[in-house]
């Protein structure tokens, strides 16, 4: 068993767990109960954060690659695709269809 990630919010780990299980990778969440404890009853420090672990060490690299893919900001491609307004020459993010500055339509 090998630790993949550690998160204060076990909901994130449960999401990752479902993603990895869908890929056929056996994983488990450790220390999940610590996160549910009342503050004050246990020290909430990273050492006690819930951990997502792969059951089989040989799945580790593949699991990490999948998690990296998932945690990448979805806007990466859009940011790379920014465009310049022909009217006012402001730079617009790729997901904008009209200029944020002068509201000109994006030229194709
Ligand atoms: Zn403009």
Image: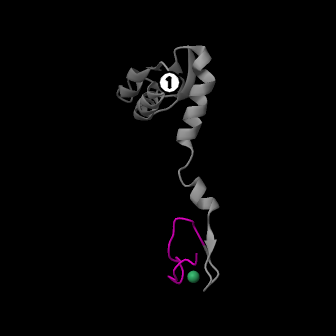
Across and down, in percent, residue 94 comes to 57, 65
From which residue to which does the magenta span run? 92-108
The quadrant of the rendering that contains the N terminus is top right
The response on whether ligand 1 sits within 8 Å of label 1 is: no
Kindly indicate the quadrant of the structure image that contains residue 17: top left
- Residue position for label 1: 51
Ligand 1, by image quadrant, is bottom right
Q: Is residue 101 magenta?
A: yes
> Which quadrant of the view contains residue 68?
top right
Q: Where is residue 37 in the image (x, y as percent from the top left)?
A: 36, 25
- Secondary structure at badge 1 equals strand
Question: Does 41 appear above or below 102?
Answer: above
| Majority secondary structure of magenta residues | loop
22 or 34: nearer the viewer: 22
Residue 4, can we see it?
yes
Q: Position of residue 8 (x, y in %)?
A: 47, 33
Q: Does the magenta stretch include residue 94?
A: yes
In the displayed structure, 80 sits above or below 9; it is: below
């Amino acid at each position: 068993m090998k630790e993949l990630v550690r998160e204060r919010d076990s909901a994130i780990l449960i999401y990752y767990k479902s993603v990895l299980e869908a890929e056929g990778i056996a994983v488990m969440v450790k220390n999940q109960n610590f996160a549910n404890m009342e503050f004050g009853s246990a020290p909430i420090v990273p050492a006690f954060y819930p951990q997502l672990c792969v059951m089989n060490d040989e799945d580790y690299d593949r699991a990490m690659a999948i998690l990296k893919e998932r945690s990448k900001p979805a806007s990466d491609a859009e940011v790379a695709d920014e465009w310049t307004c022909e009217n006012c020459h402001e730079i617009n993010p790729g997901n904008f269809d009209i200029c944020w500055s002068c509201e000109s339509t994006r030229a194709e």
